[in-house]
Image: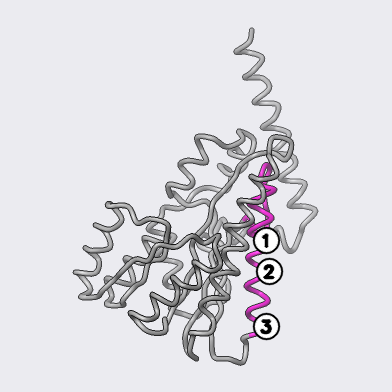
Amino acid sequence: MGLGIACRLLRRGENVSVLDLVVPPTARASLNEAALQGQAKWHSVEMDIRDEANVQSAVAEAIALFGPPGLALNCAGIVLNKTISAMKGEEFALVVDINLNGSFYFVHAVLPHLLPGSRLALIASVAGFTSNYAYSAYGASKFGVIGLAKTLRYEYSDSGIGITCVCPPEVETPLVFKEREQGDPVALGIKALGGCLSADYACDKIVAGLDKGTWMIIPGRRAKGMVLLSRLLPETFHAVMAHHIRKLRRTLAGKITTTET
């Protein structure tokens, strides 16, 4: 999603700094093409979102080249789809370090450079409202990102700096493709009920929401409905989830028994 949003900004003539561990050749080609179309510029700075000092220096380097950003967006994140009993402590800590601590490091580095009229946006997830089976690390970290964004909104409400929290459902990205190969089958079955958005659709909705100055961007009607139900009728939402989890467990147990037999 970060690549898709960056390309959209470049195509309309906005200069973009990409801060990441690495920008693969295919991504560089897409960024170069988008910059050519929009007669804009982009550059990359190597950055590890887990290293606060590195984040500070990378943000400073980007601002030295293009000046204070009109939009600062943190897309960095990983997912871990494992039950608590199957998870190691260091795995949980890594997800929280990248998704939640990394969001704070980025916020802390970029906020002093933002001017009135600019916008700071954090990508959380629908899982930050609903979580999921086998989502203890990911769900907890994204709940935290939403909490961080809400606090920022309180603290900067009179500053002229807009705050946006983006909470997409599942989106067709390499992160999701990898999760489908390794994730817990019950969790994957639950995620399938929520549907999956194309990356283009999600990026279009996110950019449109950022342009409007929307506080909470939730792409997709089904995702909005899930969030609304989980917030207004939490016990009903839990009952529905628990029903589907039991159903999936029975189905999977039947497949295992059939295979073994």
Q: Quadrant of the N terminus?
A: bottom left
Give the residue drawn at x 76%, y 49%: 238
> Which residues lie in the magenta part?
127-155
> Is 162 rendered above or below residue 220?
below
Q: Is residue 142 magenta?
A: yes
Q: Residue at x 68, y 40 (%)?
A: 88
- Relative placement, left or right, of 43 versus 167 is left
Q: Is residue 131 left or right of residue 10?
A: right
In primary-sequence order, the first of circles 1 and 3 is 1
Q: Nearer the viewer, residue 56 or 86?
A: 56
User: Mainly helix, strand or loop, the magenta region?
Assistant: helix
Q: Which residue is denoted by mark 3 in the rendering?
A: 154
Residue 181 place in picture, x, y as percent: 50, 34
Type of the residue with mark 2: Gly
Question: Which residue position holds label 2?
Answer: 147
Where residue 71 appears, x then y in whole percent?
44, 78
Q: Nearer the viewer, residue 165 or 55?
A: 55
SS under mark 3: helix
